[in-house]
Image: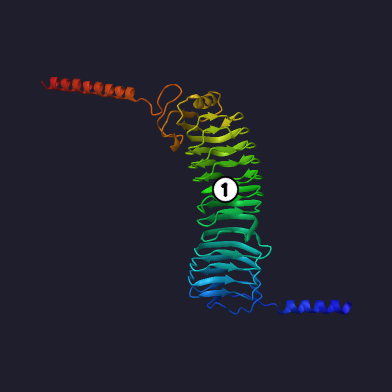
Amino acid sequence: MRSTQFAAAVAAFAGLAVAKTCTKDIEISEPTPVIDCDVVDADITVNEDVSGALSIEGPKQLKGNLIINNASSILSISSSSINSIGGRLEFQELNSLNSIDMGSLESVSEIVMRKLTALQTITFGSDSVTEAESVEITDTDLSSLSGLMLTSVKDLNINNNDRLTKFDSALVNVTGQLLINSNGRDMEITLNDLESASEIQIGNVKTFEVPKLSVVKASLKFDQCDKLESFSAPNLTKITDALAFINNEQLSNVSFPKLTEIGGDLRIVNNTEFTDISGFPKLESAASINFGGNFEEIDMPELNRVSGTADVSTTSTEEDFCKFFEKADDDGVIRGGADCTFDNEDANQGGETEGGRKTDGSSSSGDDSGDNEDAAGIVGVNTALMGLALIAGVAQLL
């Protein structure tokens, strides 16, 4: 038994002894290069003239970057040996690339994939890539991101992938930005495990599900989600910066049953089906409010502090909507003052839009005729005084 263990130990030591580390940058100039290194403590780049099926075999660990840019004739990229990349995996402007197969890769710091317009499949290791500093996937032909099983990431940017209509992820934390927009039509996003994020910006999606999200450390914004009908964040309690819903033409309902604080602007503008603002039953404070739309009803029973202004406008001909803000202003809830207009056909342009009526019967644009009359009177008096001065001067000459 001891001799067997000793032999195994010797073999393991021998394996370590012959492991080869390369410390100089490697440039690949052919599709099947010979790289006699177990560890590359440098960068690997691929020459633009390489074409066909690129196979990178040999290295197991790459401590630097793997960079393949502007090689428009590469059809596929594969490696069965590379299991970790300490730096950046960067593939850009590979117009003919249709597949990436790196079946052993389980760890990478940063992924950048831009303008891979023919790319249809990505395969990473069996345990996939679960953590990364940042991931950007832009302008591809991908219909699935199943090769990415991220649980933690700093920045995730997925945009302009026309065939990508679903994204289901086990993400738990996004410490930087989560940006998803302009992908496939009617895109559905499910992030059932996401608990916290910093900046979230969502565009052109049909659904966005985040049932466990409890904290947003910067802003949460939805813009031009034409098919989004509703949004719910049942466990979200605080948004450090802004919350915005802008230009979502089918959005009719939002629900934030536990949200108590918005550190920045609460902005709801140009969501033409949105008529009832009652999805904030626990909201106590916001820095400012900007509403513009077809609102008819509002119920924010716990609101007790708006440190800035409230600029609000609705197309509704009923003045009751504005009375809520008028009372809040009178009660000192809105510290910077409230300006609310109703019966304003341009209300969807934003709360600061001129036009419409106020509850006191005045127009938001005001009536400056009195000012004009006062100005005319001042001009008349000044003219008369000048005339008298001229007459006096002439009399002295005589």
Decide: few, some or many residues near mark 1? Use Cα within 10 Å; few <14, some 14-19, many ≥20. many
Report x, y in % for residue 208: 58, 47
> In the rendered image, which residue does mark 1 sit on?
200
Q: Is residue 312 above or below residue 194?
A: above
Report x, y in % for residue 203: 52, 48
- Number of marks in the image? 1
Q: Is residue 207 left or right of residue 235?
A: left
Q: Is residue 364 left or right of residue 98?
A: left
Report x, y in % for residue 10: 80, 79
Q: Is residue 180 above or below residue 337?
A: below
Q: Is residue 112 left or right of residue 20?
A: left
Quarter in which the N terminus is drawn: bottom right
Report x, y in % for residue 93: 49, 66
Q: Tell me the residue at 27%/23% (across/down).
A: 376
The kind of residue tagged 1 is Ile
Figure quadrant of residue 42: bottom right
Q: Is residue 43 visible?
A: no
Tag 1's secondary structure? strand
Q: Is residue 129 visible?
A: yes
Q: Tell me the residue at 76%/79% (across/down).
A: 14
Figure quadrant of residue 100: bottom right
Quarter in which the C terminus is drawn: top left
Q: Tell me the residue at 38%/29% (across/down).
A: 365
Q: Is residue 314 left or right of residue 187?
A: left
| Nearer to us in this view, 258 or 331 | 258
The colour scheme used here is rainbow
| Nearer to us in this view, 41 or 184 | 184
